Amino acid sequence: MEPDCADSDMTHMHSHAEESHTHHHRHKQTRSVLNRLSRAIGHLNAVRGMVEEGRDCSEVLIQLAAVRSAINKTCEVILKDHLDHCIVDAVENGDTRAINELHQAIELLMGRG
């Protein structure tokens, strides 16, 4: 049961080729994630402009750190949404594949993959 689904922005769908089911989830944070990504893309484009203009390396590095922070926060929002919806559903349905995929994704996010 997903009590928060009715208030959601967008629908996210999972389909596993090796499995016979597809499950649908509505995530509350989809619009927020898209907005965060748009801002990060804009910021990264601005950093690219700084490099093209020959701006000071320290300034560029500081701005890149801000972009990385924005991307990390976006990952955090997506991960929480995934846990709250997809993984709860996976546990309820005995879907160990989704849980294994989450483990792999976390390893990659942590730079260990």
Image (cartoon, rainbow, N blue to C red):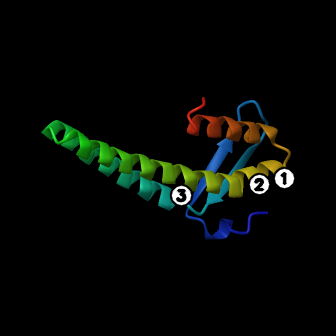
Q: Residue at x 31, y 50 (%)?
A: 43
Q: Residue furthest front?
A: 58
Residue under numbered circle 2: 88
Determine whether 91 is above or below 111 in the image: below
Rounded to the nearest angstrom, the CA distance separating label 1 from label 3 is: 23 Å
What residue is shown at x 30% (from left), y 42% (from top)? 61
Element at badge 2?
A: helix
Q: Residue at x 78, y 34 (%)?
A: 19
Q: Are the residues flagged by discs 3 and 2 in contact, CB closer than 8 Å?
A: no
Three-letter amino acid code of the residue under disc 2: Val
Where does residue 70 sit, x and y in percent of width and height?
Answer: 43, 52
Q: Nearer the viewer, residue 37 or 9?
A: 37
Question: Which residue was labeled with disc 3?
Answer: 30
Alpha-carbon neighbours of circle 2 within 10 Å: few (<14), some, or many (≥20)? some
**Residue on which the image places disc 1:** 92
Give 94 or 105, whichever is nearer the viewer: 105
> The N terminus lies in which quarter of the figure?
bottom right
SS of the residue under disc 3: helix
* Coordinates of residue 23 in the picture (x, y in percent): 72, 48
Amino acid bearing label 3: Thr
Q: Residue 30 versus residue 42: which sits nearer the camera?
A: 42
- Sequence-wise, the earlier of marks 1 and 3 is 3
Q: Are marks 2 and 1 in contact (CB under 8 Å)?
A: yes
Q: Nearer the viewer, residue 13 or 70?
A: 70
